[in-house]
Image (cartoon, helix red, strand yellow):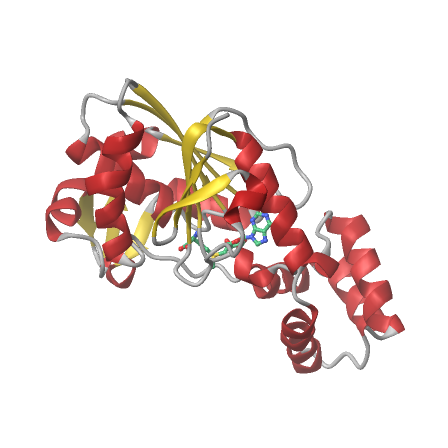
């Protein structure tokens, strides 16, 4: 790491509480160097001064580090497994589920789970918390307005039932919106919730260093109830899940081993 980038990461941490050192360095540095060059700053320290003074540059910088791409029912086969085997398994002996969609971006993931539960498990009581580090995406998530592209993997019955088409936008049904509580949460810094039955955390851990990932897996495991489930993204298999008291249940689903 050059001194310039090192100093930049320290300044970003004290300004925003985001520890860039816990994200894979080569990838992050490449992304930020290209943005910095595009804006005409020759080193990271002058670039930091600029983002510190200019809100537009700061938002653009946040967009570049957070990578907010999402969609409803991303990797649809996994959502079918969730519906057909994972949820039936965890609701044995339970009438109530607590679900956490961590790093939820613009809300497609927590709304997907809210729709799935309303449609197929209508009697189940649910608490759905959805969090992200980026306040801008959380605002968008609360609005619940999407382009048709974001819905391309969503089964038609859910699309028809839970959206209203307004112009070229699709708006999430207000009963579904009310089921999800959005909050700001930094996976690398903040306290994790307790007694969660299902954590959905997909397509963010790939950006972190192995050390940071291990800490997050341990925190997720601590946050889960006995036999609770962690649902990860389709490139994010955990190599030694038992280190974290987790066992592979199905591809990209891990279950907390009860004591
Ligand atoms: C690619 S999106 C994933 C969205 C959704 N989970 C999915 O799979 O479609 C990654 C999200 O992780 C969030 N993120 C990045 N670093 C984070 C951190 N330290 N804590 C919480 N969220 C973070 C970003 O803001 C972004 O919205």
Please give left or right for residue 238 compared with residue 62 in the image: left
Quadrant, the N terminus: bottom right
Q: Position of residue 72 (x, y in %)?
A: 29, 53
Q: Residue furthest right?
A: 3
- Which residue is rendered at x = 32% and y = 20% of the image? 96
Please give left or right for residue 6 compared with residue 154 in the image: right
Height in image: 140 above or below 198?
A: below
Please give left or right for residue 154 compared with residue 128 in the image: left
Quarter assignment of residue 243: top right
Height in image: 27 above or below 107?
A: below
- Which residue is rendered at x = 21% and y = 51% of the image? 166
- Which residue is rendered at x = 46% and y = 57% of the image? 237
Q: Nearer the viewer, residue 240 or 138?
A: 240
Q: Position of residue 228 (x, y in %)?
A: 41, 32
Q: Position of residue 131 (x, y in %)?
A: 50, 40
Q: Nearer the viewer, residue 117 or 31?
A: 117
- Confirm whether residue 7 shows in the render: yes
Task: Count how many numbered circles sit on residues in the image.
Answer: 0
């Amino acid at each position: 790491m050059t001194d310039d980038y090192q100093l930049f990461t320290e300044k970003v941490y004290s300004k925003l509480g985001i520890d860039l050192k816990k994200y894979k360095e080569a990838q992050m540095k490449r992304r930020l160097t290209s943005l910095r060059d595009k804006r005409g700053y020759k080193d990271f320290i002058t670039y930091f001064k600029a983002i510190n003074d200019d809100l537009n540059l700061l938002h653009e910088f946040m967009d570049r580090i957070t990578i907010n791409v999402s969609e409803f029912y991303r990797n649809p086969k996994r959502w079918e497994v969730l519906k057909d085997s994972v949820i039936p398994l965890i609701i044995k002996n339970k009438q109530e589920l607590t679900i956490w969609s961590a790093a939820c971006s613009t809300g497609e993931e927590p709304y997907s789970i809210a729709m799935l539960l309303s449609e197929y498990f209508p009697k189940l009581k649910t608490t759905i918390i959805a969090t992200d580090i980026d306040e801008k995406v959380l605002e968008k998530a609360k609005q619940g307005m999407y382009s048709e592209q974001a819905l391309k993997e969503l089964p038609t019955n859910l699309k028809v039932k839970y959206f209203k088409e307004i112009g070229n936008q699709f708006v999430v049904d207000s009963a579904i919106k009310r089921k999800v509580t959005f909050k700001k949460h930094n996976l690398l810094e903040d306290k994790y919730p307790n007694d969660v039955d299902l954590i959905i955390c997909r397509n963010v851990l790939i950006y972190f260093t192995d050390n940071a990932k291990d800490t997050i897996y341990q925190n997720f495991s601590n946050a889960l109830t006995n036999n609770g489930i962690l649902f990860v993204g389709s490139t994010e298999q955990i190599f030694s899940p038992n280190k974290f008291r987790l066992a592979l249940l199905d591809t990209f689903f891990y279950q907390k081993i009860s004591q």
